[in-house]
Amino acid sequence: MELKMTKTLFALVCLSCCVWAQEGTGPFPAVMEQDPGLPTHTVYRPKELAALRGQKLPIIAWGEGGCSNNGAFYRNFLGEISSHGFLAIATGPPQAPPATGNPGRGGPATKSSQLIDAINWAFAENGRKDSQYYNRLDTSKVAVMGHSCGGIQALAVGEDARIKLIGNWSGGLYTTPPNGAGAATEIVPKEQLDKLHSPVFYISGDSTDIAFANTNDDFKRITKVPAFRAYKDGVGHGGTYTQPNGGDFGKVAVALLEWQFKGNQEAGRMFLGANCGLCQDSKWHVEKKGIE
């Protein structure tokens, strides 16, 4: 009995470790860490930076859903992105998942300014000679992304001239101020959409997603920059982020970043043309503006 219990406990511990430290499917196995120079965030990067062989990492600043202060909740999704040669910086320090499975907020609600903090830190590290990131980051390729509250935060800072891409995952701007749990979310007026200067990609769940209507409304209002809107049947507001390697949303995110920041035209086929990859999948629904 004692041996059986020991084996069971060992299996549970190993499973927890594997989930906690998922490395992604890309050519650069990822690591999640808290950098002492940015203790308010969680950093996802290729584990072996020397393996990049001169390839520079584009920068992704990620905002947490629920304005959560736990930068580890989207670890499967962000680890997958990082494993394909990207530096992803999430708001909030990394916190182990609680036994209840409820991620909680993990501290005070995050703010959109923390996305700018992440970008500023990355730029500084790229220029600091003692940094492991010295001359290893591509500061010409910066994206802000986020889920729910984090998606709203991405739009809130989207006018920053350094930002070249916005990814909004179930985070359309509110037409009516939220109550209750959503009250921690910053109120960003719809007029902010007119201040954006880079392409915007909206990905969400289906009509059961609480952000569905707001996301659709955002997309309709955008007229000055290219915009892409897609949602998948059978997926709710929680998306697929916690599935292995971020699930379907992880695949979409990697393809988007590979196309936009690395010129990967094969990856771009997921979004381009009347017969785009997502367009041909009956579970996905796609609309586009300024994107052929």
Image (cartoon, rainbow, N blue to C red):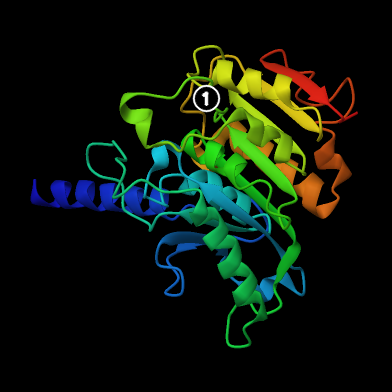
Q: Which residue is more in the foreground, 137 or 225? A: 225
Is residue 35 visible in this depiction of the protein? yes
Residue at horizontal 31 percent and vertical 43 percent from the top: 105
Under tag 1, what secondary structure?
A: loop
Whole-percent x and y of residue 177?
A: 44, 24
Q: Relative to residue 97, is residue 254 drawn left or right? A: right
Place residue 87 in its image quadrant: bottom right
For label 1, count other residues whose C-alpha is less than 10 Å away and answer few (under 14), some (14-19) or many (20+): many
Dot 1 amino acid type? Tyr
Q: Relative to residue 277, is residue 120 drawn left or right? A: left
Whole-percent x and y of residue 2?
A: 9, 50
Residue at horizontal 41 percent and vertical 24 percent from the top: 178
Q: Relative to residue 149, is residue 61 drawn left or right? A: right
Whole-percent x and y of residue 250?
A: 60, 39
Q: Does residue 150 sit above or below 7 in this rendering?
A: above
Q: Which residue is mark 1?
A: 174
Q: Which residue is more in the foreground, 8 or 78? A: 78
Q: Does residue 191 sit above or below 54 in this rendering?
A: above
**Image quadrant occupied by the C terminus:** top right
**Image quadrant occupied by the N terminus:** top left
Whole-percent x and y of residue 167?
A: 65, 39
Which residue is most to the bottom? 130
The mark tally for this picture is 1
Q: Does residue 135 sit above or below 251 in this rendering?
A: below
Is residue 246 visible in this depiction of the protein? no
Which residue is most to the left? 1
Q: Relative to residue 230, is residue 156 drawn left or right? A: left
Q: Does residue 69 sit above or below 191 in this rendering?
A: below
Residue at horizontal 31 percent and vertical 52 percent from the top: 96
Q: Which residue is more in the foreground, 152 or 63? A: 152
Place residue 94 in its image quadrant: bottom left
